[in-house]
Amino acid sequence: MKSITSRSLLTILSLVLLSSCSQEVPTEVTPQPLEVVTGPFLIRDGIRYHQDTNELVTGIVEEFHENGQLRDKSNFKDGVLDGLNEYFHENGQLLFRANYRDGKPDGLHESFHENGQLRDKSNFKDGVLDGLRESFHGNGQLKETGNFQDGKREGIWESFDEGGQLLNSVNYRERTQTPQFDLPRVLYPEQRVKSTDYAGKIALVNFWATWCVGCLQEREFLMELSRGGMPIYGIVWRDRRELAIQSLETRGDPYVASGFDGDAIAGTDIPITSTQTALWGVTGAPETFLIGRDGSVLYQHLGQLTSEIFVTEFIPLIKSDLSAGL
């Protein structure tokens, strides 16, 4: 299966990152009939306009993969998403289905594996996660379950392996803060990269190594995210500095900065202080953490990061964090 194209990925990412500065658009009292509308379109401050007339887009917008298959079908009203929004794989399989109201996620959001199995279902209320959220392995087994309240994890969250074995149980009575770190930079050892560098930002923290095949395979996708405006901080995990430098120079550098943690000081071996304290807990590379504006861990992904995973797992949490007050 091919990944989502760079153009569509950057469109999704720009819509999300710009949504925090979107302005409210007056809506008509009388509903307008929905019909398929065609581009070209212009996106400005998270609002979609007809490029030729500068009018706000209202109606059904359809976009297609290069093979002619429908890629996404979205309902717009006065320039913002309003109603059902669907994304599809190049083979026609449904990838993501979500409901919006006045440009904000509202109601049920669902994503699906390539085999058609449900990957994730979440409930949104006025733009933020609220209620039960469940994710599933490709074989249909429950992967993670827990509740959100006003965009924050609440109560007991549990995760399971593909065989149904309980892996972890955490009580989120308070939002979970990322562990602090202060590491020398890979390229400039005399400088430091710190967890405080992304304070107040939505960011990714990506643990990687040159001996890790998945890390090398996800590099180009991380480059796409970086070009789209996503801040990514790297931590080189259990590796040699000279090999990491060579990798960044030859394969590309998507990171705002990379810290060198050759001895895995930041990644593991940190004592557990309480059930409310989330540690990095890295068990292998690559692992990627989504960090909220308040410094909390919104999501932890084990393994190679792909465009499909980012759209289905990360984008809803980014939207929720942008919509929630600090």
Image: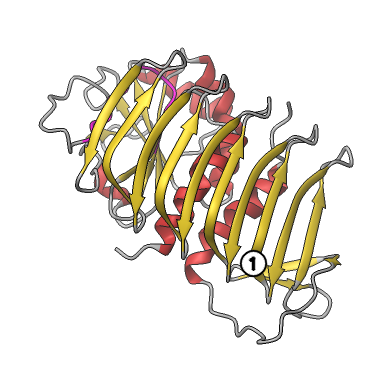
Q: Is residue 145 above or below residue 131?
A: above
Q: Is residue 252 left or right of residue 130?
A: right
- Whether residue 3 is visible here, answered yes or no, is yes
Give whichever of 245, 49 is nearer the camera.
Answer: 49
Q: Is residue 314 above or below residue 99?
A: above
Q: Is residue 271 left or right of residue 306?
A: left
The image shows residue 143 at horizontal and vertical percentages of: 44, 26
Q: Residue furthest right?
A: 68
Give the overall secondary structure of the magenta segment: loop
The image shows residue 201 at horizontal and vertical percentages of: 36, 55
For mark 1, give the secondary structure: strand
Q: Is residue 133 left or right of residue 81?
A: left
Query: What residue is drawn where x is 70% and y is 46%?
Result: 87
Q: Quadrant of the C terminus?
A: bottom left
**Which quadrant of the structure image shows residue 78?**
bottom right
- In the image, what residue type sits under mark 1? Asp
- Whether residue 301 is visible here, answered yes or no, is no
The image shows residue 224 at horizontal and vertical percentages of: 60, 41
The image shows residue 279 at horizontal and vertical percentages of: 23, 31
Q: Residues within 10 Å of mark 1 (few under 14, many from 20)?
A: many
The figure's colour scheme reads secondary structure
The residue tagged 1 is: 82
Q: Is residue 172 magenta?
A: no
Q: Which residues are magenta?
A: 278-289
Query: What residue is drawn where x is 53% and y is 52%?
Result: 229
Label count reads 1
